[in-house]
């Protein structure tokens, strides 16, 4: 029987977790954001508040809807507060060992029938499912950044995902007014399989001196009608996330065309992670 979803838990108060929390709360779900750091939760809730306030000032949301959405949202640093969740979406950092540790702590805290989804942008759903106690109630729900703006969500089944899980996830995503594409469980699915090699190539273009940061981004904005240049987009996604997706493609598909650009590796080693760290291909300080 398909699960009824009312209470949604979000693991991780980063840009993706908060974006998912925002759209879920705005759609009427009761949302609990879990993060180890109370400061990150506070900062995340403040960002969500700011985004909702902007929607009110743009006339896209009524003030009472904003207040109602905020009242449906809370944060916790105690995983046991997720005991009543019907669906938990993991949106932690794109690192398999971190996600595995989270699932080990999360699973015993959840009710047996709760569904777990991961917002991973590249990792094997089947392998992550096997790190939980409920592979049949586990799948990939991959949102795009910024979540409140981007229409697409990729749905990815693992080998053990039950059809009732898939249907519940599909209905949940539809209720957020998003468009669904279904991808098979291959490294980086559809969007990132295509997008990240393009970004990596842009970094090679910079590395080889074909053009400056500005020339590359202007070329792709005005020459290919992309809303952001690829280097600006890389900074926006986070250079650590870009690198980890390229590594998953390189390892998983064993093709040298996915080799991460050495300049990308160097930036990440320097802690230049893009917007979130204040410096990437652009300076945000
Ligand atoms: N969070 C919430 N809302 C945001 C936002 C954010 N971070 N950034 C912008 N917005 C909203 C603005 O409030 C504005 O809303 P209104 O129309 O209601 O006013 C709207 O988006 C447009 O914003 P702006 O006019 O300020 O800026 P823009 O027109 O330059 O658009 C953009 C900004 C939507 C981010 C646009 O540049 C864009 O589409 N960029 C490409 C984004 C993209 O490719 N995302 C996918 C990344 S890949 C991915 O996510 C997969 C992965 O796993 C890595």
Image: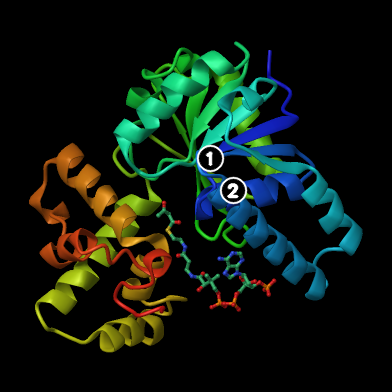
Residue at image coords 23%, 60%: 268
Residue at image coords 24%, 59%: 197
Q: Looking at the picture, how far across and down is residue 30, in whole percent?
A: 75, 37
- Using the image, determine if residue 261 lies above or below residue 134: below
Q: Are marks 2 and 1 in contact (CB under 8 Å)?
A: yes
Label 1 lies in ligand 1 vicinity (Cβ under 8 Å): no
Left or right of 69 in this view: 201 = left
Residue at image coords 68%, 18%: 2
User: Where, by quadrant of the figure, is residue 259 drawn?
Assistant: bottom left
| SS at badge 1 | loop
Q: Looking at the picture, how far across and down is residue 165, in whole percent?
A: 58, 22
Callout 1 crowding tier (Cα within 10 Å): few <14, some 14–19, many ≥20: many
Q: Nearer the viewer, residue 75 or 180?
A: 75
Give the label on residue 43, or none: none
| SS at badge 2 | helix
Q: Is residue 177 something one can see in this rendering? A: no
User: Where, by quadrant of the figure, is residue 113 drawn?
Assistant: top right
- Using the image, determine if residue 149 lies above or below residue 19: below
Residue hosting label 2 = 41
Q: Nearer the viewer, residue 226 or 238?
A: 238
Residue at image coords 51%, 42%: 12
Q: Is residue 37 something one can see in this rendering? A: yes
Give the label on residue 35, or none: 1
Left or right of 169 in this view: 157 = left
Left or right of 214 in this view: 3 = right
Q: Looking at the picture, how far across and down is residue 237, in whole percent?
A: 40, 61
> Which residue of the protein is positioned furthest toward the right in this rendering?
64
| Marks 2/1: CA–CA distance | 6 Å
């Amino acid at each position: 029987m398909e699960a009824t979803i009312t209470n949604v838990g979000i693991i991780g108060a980063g840009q993706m977790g908060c974006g998912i929390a925002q759209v879920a709360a705005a759609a009427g779900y009761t949302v609990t954001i879990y993060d180890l750091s109370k400061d990150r939760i506070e900062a995340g809730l403040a960002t969500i508040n700011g985004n909702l306030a902007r929607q009110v000032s743009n006339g896209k949301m009524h003030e009472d809807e904003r207040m109602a959405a905020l009242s449906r949202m809370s944060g916790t640093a105690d995983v046991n507060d997720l005991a009543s969740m019907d669906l938990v979406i993991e949106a932690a950092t794109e690192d398999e060992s971190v996600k595995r540790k989270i699932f080990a702590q999360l699973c015993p805290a959840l009710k047996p029938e709760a569904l777990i989804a991961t917002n991973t942008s590249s990792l094997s759903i089947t392998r992550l499912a096997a790190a939980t106690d409920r592979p049949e109630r586990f799948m990939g729900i991959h949102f795009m950044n910024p979540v409140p703006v981007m229409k697409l969500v990729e749905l990815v089944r693992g080998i053990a995902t039950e059809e009732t899980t898939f249907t519940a996830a599909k209905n949940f995503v539809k209720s957020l007014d998003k468009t669904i594409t279904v991808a098979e469980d291959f490294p980086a699915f559809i969007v990132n399989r295509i997008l990240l090699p393009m970004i990596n190539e842009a970094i090679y273009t910079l590395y080889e001196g074909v053009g400056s940061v500005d020339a590359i981004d202007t070329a792709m904005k005005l020459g290919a009608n992309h809303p952001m240049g690829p280097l600006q987009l890389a900074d926006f996604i986070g250079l650590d996330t870009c690198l980890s997706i390229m590594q998953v493609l390189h390892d998983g598909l064993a093709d040298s065309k996915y080799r991460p650009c050495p300049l990308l590796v160097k930036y990440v080693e320097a802690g230049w992670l893009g917007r979130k760290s204040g410096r990437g291909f652009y300076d945000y300080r």
